[in-house]
Amino acid sequence: MSTLKEMRRGAVASVPMIIGGIPFGLLFGSLASSYGLSPWFAIAMSSMVFAGSAQFVAIGLISIHAPLWVIVSTTFIVNLRHLLYAADMVKYVKHLPMRLRIIMGFGLIDETYAAVRPLYGMGIVDEKTGHKAYLGSFLSFYVMWNVTTILGVVSGELIPGMSEWGLEFAMVATFISIITPYLKAAPFWFAMVSAGIASVLLVDLPNNLGLLVSAVIAVSVGYFSDAALNKNKPSLVGTSGGES
Amino acid sequence: MTLMDSVLVIAGMFVVTFGVRFMLFARAHKVSMPAFLDRALKFVPVAVLTSIITPMIFVSEHRMNVSFENPWLLGALAAFFVGLWKQQQLLTIVVGVVVFFAAKYAFS
């Protein structure tokens, strides 16, 4: 019943991915300082953009002096997947006041979607309580992300070489844990394999544009193989993403 | 980077990120997705996340590294199989990270 209890439910459901996010936040902060970016820049990015993978890709682009349009359009493509999450969440959001929708939109990250969406699916929360669980998840990620960014910035300055420990691997493992639940139908496998091949072949394109191109190729491969395999059926219903 | 550059980068990233996330919520009461967009969008997470991590796994210093002494490859394979098999996020992440660091120290 109580708001706090629902918020706690959302936070508890998020714990596995919060743990996965800690090294990632530390790494973001320490990489930013090893690239010579100001601590305030890293902190401003974490608190205002709040998009782990896009921030990571963006500071990589900044370190190779990519132009602004590349940084912004790569951010757009990297975050485009959130449109899918939004489309799936709309039915649980449409009755809420705009003020709440703004906050929920700001906090719509992979992890909160992956943690909270299954709670609706399993009937643990509903239209009346779900947004509270969502806010609990969002707040716990937001606090974790900003605190670890600051700690990363500080420790990056204190412990040189921290950015070479391989902390990025936490991001690789987290993304794999988000990808694998989708792999229940052939078109998702085709999309994954084509993304893998294209991204490696195109890795030396300037400004890391290979990421953008390979994402577009993989979505097209998924789309057309889905259309060919399911000619007479409507598209695969929804997704299974995150329903672990 | 100048202060102006920093402000522009963060403002630009904020606009596209928040825009993508909030666009549908803003018009939630009258939103309907065209079928083709629905069909295409569901491939975006797999497409984007795979495109980000595959070069991290296989490429180091402009070279392909597919040997079994590549800790990135070993950790990723471990996470991938555990993810497919158990479908548990925490387990997938932990197994991947443990295998990665074990391999990294074993081969360094």
Image (cartoon, coloured by chain):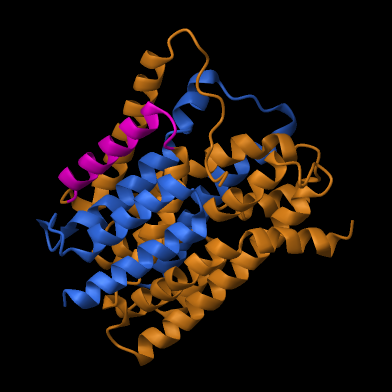
Chain colours: A orange, B blue
Residue B21: x, y in percent?
A: 58, 45
Camera-side residue of A183 and A81: A183
Q: Quadrant of residue A122?
A: top right
Up/down of B27 relative to B62, above or below: above
Residue A221: tell me if it is visible.
yes
Mostly what secondary structure, the magenta segment? helix
Image coords of residue A68 (percent x, y): 35, 55
Q: Where A101 sits versus A91, above or below? A: below
Q: Which residues are magenta?
A: A183-203
Image coords of residue A220 (percent x, y): 34, 27
- x, y (%) of residue A212? 31, 43
Residue at the extreme top of the image, as rendered: A232
Relative horizontal placement of residue B100, taking residue A151 as reference (left or right): left
Q: In percent of the image, x 47 and y 7: which residue is there?
A: A232
- In the picture, which quadrant includes the N terminus of chain A? bottom right
* Towards the viewer: A61 or A188: A188
Nearer to the camera, A153 or A63: A153
Residue A129 included in the magenta stretch of the image: no
Residue A184: image quadrant is top left
Q: Name the outermost residue toward the right.
A: A1
Q: For the view shown, which residue lies furthest in the bottom direction?
A: A158
Q: Where is B3 relative to B73, above or below? A: below
